[in-house]
Image: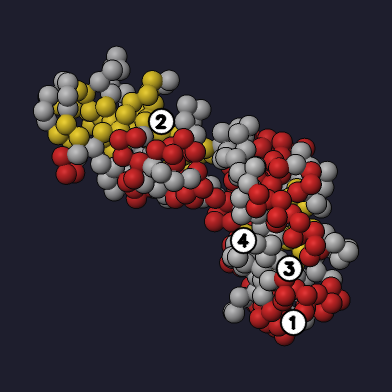
Amino acid sequence: MTRAVLTIDLAALVANWRALDAMTAGETGAVVKADAYGLGVDRVAPALAAAGARQFFVALADEGAAVRRALGPGPRISVFSGHMAGDAATLRDHDLVPVLNSPEQMRRHAEALPGHAFGIQLDTGMNRLGLEPVDWAALRVEALARSPTLVMSHLACADEPDHPMNARQLAAFRAMTDGTGLPRALSATGGILLGRDYHFDLCRPGVGLYGGMPFADAAPVVGLTLPVVQTRDVAIGETVGYSNSWTAARPSRIATVAAGYADGLIRAMGASARLFAGATPCPVVGRVSMDLITVDVTDLAEDPETLTILGAQQGVDVLASAAGTIGYEILTALGRRYERRYTA
């Protein structure tokens, strides 16, 4: 093996979508923004569509165009950022549904694409995107007269089930949307796990599809195996890597693998991270550099040809914890130098 291999298990992805779908009584869509969380929307979106997903969500209009090319006509593709300046042609030509976030976007969409479908996002307390309650009160009659495809909001603390913000946002969403007669959507992965009160008509899971928390029962989707470039003996007192950041306390065998922070294996993980030879953990030593990571393989019976950093032994959230971040960042940072292999 001459290149690092990123394996993406589409069957596991589909199983995760079906498991989340089974928790809800309404429709279940799929969030495929950021190139399907870095895993390749051209492969991920068709697999989810074949499983039954008919609504897809992206962050930007250009992402929506890529999903439309992957899926063809039929599925609804909604754009979280709404109708940005310059988006009209992309929204029209690719039959995308902007989720309008402000009075300015409402006006822009009505003027540029009259009669074109749209959704509405409401701010229920996250203070990020969406119409404020006062704006919604002023625009509600006009907006409802134009028959939006859905009205949605987003939970700020859904990955913390006991956080009081969840109940506050649920109450705010109900107060703003009861009686509209519109399809309603509040929950991504975390909201689905909060229970039926949060599900409404449509749920839109994202990270749980890809094997990430807070969906603890998710099947692992991503595997990453790195080739060993060189293995060397390091004597007691010798150092490894930039800034002499690791010093051998025993005679050691150090393997250098071909990947680094240019490949999304971020520098902050450092010595907290582990790679695996089969089931045996091997600690990272020294600094993660742009293209290389050094690993202590002293306790292995023989030098490995490869080491695994993501797989059944260690998921994205465990690796993220070593770097002081979240699984989302690990997934979306995985680079383009890997050989990608899709399994179904």
Q: Nearer the viewer, mark 3 or mark 2?
A: 3
User: What mark, if any, has residue 155 been given in the picture?
Assistant: none
Q: Are marks 3 and 4 in contact (CB under 8 Å)?
A: no
Q: CA distance from mark 3 to mark 1?
A: 13 Å
Q: CA distance from mark 4 to mark 1?
A: 26 Å
Residue of label 3: 120
Q: Nearer the viewer, mark 3 or mark 4?
A: 4
Residue 106, horizontal then vertical, whole percent: 71, 78
User: What mark, if any, has residue 126 been given in the picture?
Assistant: 4
On the image, which quarter does residue 130 sit in? bottom right
Residue 15, horizontal then vertical, whole percent: 68, 35
Q: CA distance from mark 3 to mark 4?
A: 15 Å
Instruction: Name which residue type carries label 2.
Output: Thr
Q: Residue at x 37, y 31 (%)?
A: 274
Task: Tell me which label, 4 or 2, sits earlier in the chain.
Answer: 4
User: What mark, if any, has residue 308 been given in the picture?
Assistant: 2
